[in-house]
Image (cartoon, rainbow, N blue to C red):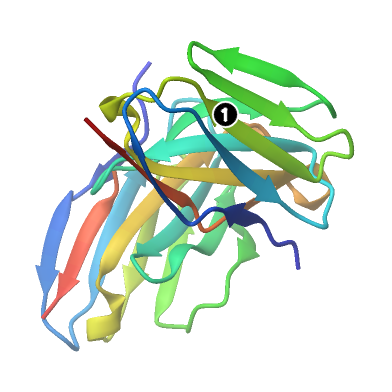
Amino acid sequence: TQLLEQSPQFLSIQEGENLTVYCNSSSVFSSLQWYRQEPGEGPVLLVTVVTGGEVKKLKRLTFQFGDARKDSSLHITAAQTGDTGLYLCAGTDNTNAGKSTFGDGTTLTVKP
Amino acid sequence: KAGVTQTPRYLIKTRGQQVTLSCSPISGHRSVSWYQQTPGQGLQFLFEYFSETQRNKGNFPGRFSGRQFSNSRSEMNVSTLELGDSALYLCASRRGTSEAFFGQGTRLTVV
């Protein structure tokens, strides 16, 4: 069974601070996705990383895929209140018909 | 291009009843997956359908079932509802083994 562990589970910071969220597994994934979800809504895809060591930037968000494709991180620079939400990582296994495994999420609260 | 559409958005049912939820995937996406999300349990995988066939299944009781139609639209059914079935039910579609795109979810409340 593939498992993804996210840390921290909860994070509360002040606007303007930087933060990093981690997603770790003992399994290798074909690709990894990061989603952001607001209460009562479905998760929205932020990014997909495919290549080991890959780094993608989306404005103030930086995503990194580990060299061995087992872990990933999401770094937010100068957090804003609009970044508040649940961040989910998901690993996709193409050897198993693209089955996705989700982490339990990191709840981020950015206070003004 | 339209996203994943789930109907209804909100639903209130009584214990013992059954419910059917609907999901229309993004055009061209043949895979549809269903998830249950509760505050304490996170996102739990229910099942995945591809070309009208169940391809993967999570660890849920037989009261939870689904199907997929030839146009890739999918329905999920829960019979003999229990209070613990109250949750946000999410549907996601994908093309092949690419990333999944989610609908807005159906909030089911069982009273």
**Is B66 or A40 nearer to us in this picture?**
A40
Number of marks in picture? 1
Task: Kindly state the secondary structure of the residue where label 1 is placed.
Answer: strand
Q: In the rendered image, which residue does mark 1 sit on?
A: A75
In the rendered image, which quarter is residue B99 located in? top right
Q: Chain of mark 1?
A: A
B9 over B83 or under it: above or below? above
- Residue furthest out toward the top: A59
Give residue B14's position: percent from left, percent from top.
11, 81
Give residue A3's position: percent from left, percent from top.
70, 62
Q: Is residue B100 visible?
A: no
Give residue A83's position: percent from left, percent from top.
35, 29
Side of A77 relative to A5 (left or right): left
Q: Residue at x 42, y 27 (%)?
A: A17
- Position of the C terminus of chain B by quadrant: bottom left
Q: Residue at x 49, y 52 (%)?
A: A105
**Is B108 or B64 nearer to us in this picture?**
B108
Q: Is residue A16 visible?
A: yes
- Residue furthest out toward the right: A68
- Position of the N terminus of chain B by quadrant: top left
Q: Assess disc 1: are there few (<14), some (14-19) or many (≥20) residues with their C-alpha within 10 Å of its C-alpha.
A: some
B53 over A74 or under it: above or below? below
**Is B32 or A104 nearer to us in this picture?**
A104
In the rendered image, which quarter is residue A2 located in? bottom right
At label 1, which amino acid type do we have?
His
Q: Residue at x 78, y 22 (%)?
A: A54
A95 over B35 or under it: above or below? above
**Is A63 or B17 nearer to us in this picture?**
A63
